[in-house]
Image: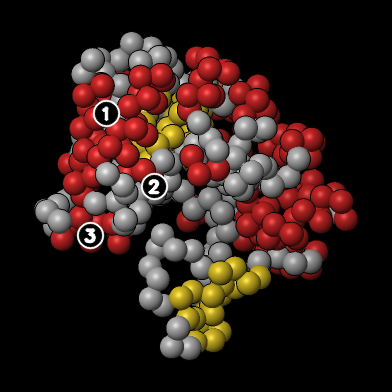
């Protein structure tokens, strides 16, 4: 089997020759450490570790400018020896500490939208007809993709996460009650943006094996909004998008949300989204418990506690082996770090982790 066939068979509970492999190589600081520890400089990590699926960057993901466009000009508003305060390309105002590289996050000071007037200006950057949003060579890409041997797809937005980005958690939480009509208008804007982009991609003949929704709508102990509010205001986005995705015969529907998503999983499964990412262990997500509850109706991409991978080999085995024994053989599971791989994981530890997965794959 090639990587495309293996990915589809794995994620649709078919019969792959072995389970598909994948992970999220996100941080330059991790690569720098690994190169100091023996990784050949400039190595393609996905090729080095024999990954079948990597949807975050590279040739398996259609490049789409799918949020605001044009972006804001990044502007430094204040600078000290320790930090910069700047307006980012997304329009946020953030404090970035100079000596703390990613995966450390900036401190968010203010979101780009704080009023209806802000929204009217911001909305001008959400025009799906902007020619720069999609590659100019869609027709040529469609032709070349006919003979692909790797899974190919695109990210297709979400109904809540972008609203939260635009207004901030507190701002959007209040808006559901203070101005629900504006929330509905913003969801309609998302439907128009992502629906139009998806239609253009399909009309160009681009074949899609997977789509990934993005929400990031939960924190350590639960959802940032109630499931009832989510169903009322955000599901119209999903109903439109999933109808389009089904009509395009896309076999694998995935969703990316950090945090504890237990109370949201039934909503997504009812919509037909079957693969959850990243199943963040620090927030209480457990692929063993989820598989026991939902059986083969749910799949996972992630689920391995990155904190354990920074420990001893015994720590790694204790974290990884029970999950492989409980859920790997059932299918629908690409075991991977439960987010980007941080630089406290050594090159040797990560290789040991991949060796364990390879050992179980060969069974």
Coordinates of residue 323 in the picture (x, y in percent): 39, 26
Which residue is tagged 1?
A: 357
Task: Tell me the quarter of the picture where residue 234 sits.
Answer: top right
Q: Are marks 1 and 3 in contact (CB under 8 Å)?
A: no
The mark closer to the camera, 2 or 1, is 2
Which residue is tagged 2?
A: 307
Residue 156 in sight: no
Graded by Cα atoms within 10 Å as few (under 14), some (14 to 19) or many (20 or more), the crowding at tag 3 reads some
Q: Secondary structure at mark 3?
A: helix
**Residue at coordinates 24% horizontally, 35% vertically from top-left?**
354
Indicate which disc, 2 or 1, sits on the residue closer to the N terminus.
2
Distance Cα–Cα, label 2 vs label 3:
17 Å
Which residue is tagged 3?
A: 33
Distance Cα–Cα, label 1 vs label 3:
22 Å
Graded by Cα atoms within 10 Å as few (under 14), some (14 to 19) or many (20 or more), the crowding at tag 2 reads some
Coordinates of residue 137 in the picture (x, y in percent): 36, 45
Task: Find the residue positioned furthest to the right.
Answer: 178
The mark closer to the camera, 2 or 3, is 2
Indicate which disc, 2 or 3, sits on the residue closer to the N terminus.
3
Coordinates of residue 138 in the picture (x, y in percent): 39, 41
Q: Secondary structure at mark 2?
A: helix
Distance Cα–Cα, label 2 vs label 1:
17 Å
């Amino acid at each position: 089997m090639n990587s495309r066939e293996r990915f589809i068979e794995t994620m649709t509970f078919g019969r792959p020759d072995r389970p598909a492999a994948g992970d999220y190589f996100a941080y330059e600081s991790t690569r720098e450490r690994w190169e100091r520890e023996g990784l050949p400089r400039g190595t393609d990590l996905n090729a080095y570790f024999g990954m079948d699926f990597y949807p975050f960057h590279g040739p398996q993901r259609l490049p789409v400018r799918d949020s605001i466009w044009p972006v804001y000009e990044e502007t430094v508003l204040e600078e000290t020896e320790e930090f910069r305060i700047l307006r980012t390309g997304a329009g946020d105002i953030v404090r970035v500490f100079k000596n703390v590289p990613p995966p450390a996050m900036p401190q968010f000071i203010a979101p780009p939208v704080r009023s209806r007037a802000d929204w009217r200006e911001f909305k001008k950057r959400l025009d799906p007809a902007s020619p720069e949003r999609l590659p100019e060579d869609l027709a040529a890409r469609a032709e070349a993709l006919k003979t692909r041997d790797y899974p190919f797809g695109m990210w297709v937005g979400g109904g809540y996460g972008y609203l939260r980005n635009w207004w901030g958690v507190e701002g959007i939480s209040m808006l559901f009650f203070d101005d629900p009509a504006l929330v509905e208008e913003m969801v309609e804007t998302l439907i128009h943006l992502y629906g139009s982009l998806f239609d253009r991609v399909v009309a160009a003949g681009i074949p899609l094996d997977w789509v990934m929704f993005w929400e990031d709508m939960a924190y350590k102990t639960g959802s940032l909004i109630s499931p009832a509010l989510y169903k009322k205001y955000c599901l119209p986005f999903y109903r439109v998008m999933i109808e389009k995705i089904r009509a395009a015969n896309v076999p694998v529907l995935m969703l990316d949300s950090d945090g504890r998503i237990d109370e949201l999983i039934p909503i997504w499964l009812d919509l037909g989204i079957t693969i959850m990412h990243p199943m963040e262990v620090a927030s209480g997500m457990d692929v063993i418990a989820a598989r026991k509850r939902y059986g083969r109706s749910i799949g996972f991409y992630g689920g391995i506690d990155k904190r354990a991978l920074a420990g001893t080999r015994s720590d790694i085995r204790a974290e990884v082996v029970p999950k492989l024994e409980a859920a790997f053989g059932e299918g629908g599971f690409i075991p991977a770090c439960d987010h980007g791989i941080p630089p406290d994981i050594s090159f040797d530890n990560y290789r040991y982790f991949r060796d364990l997965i390879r050992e179980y794959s060969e069974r």
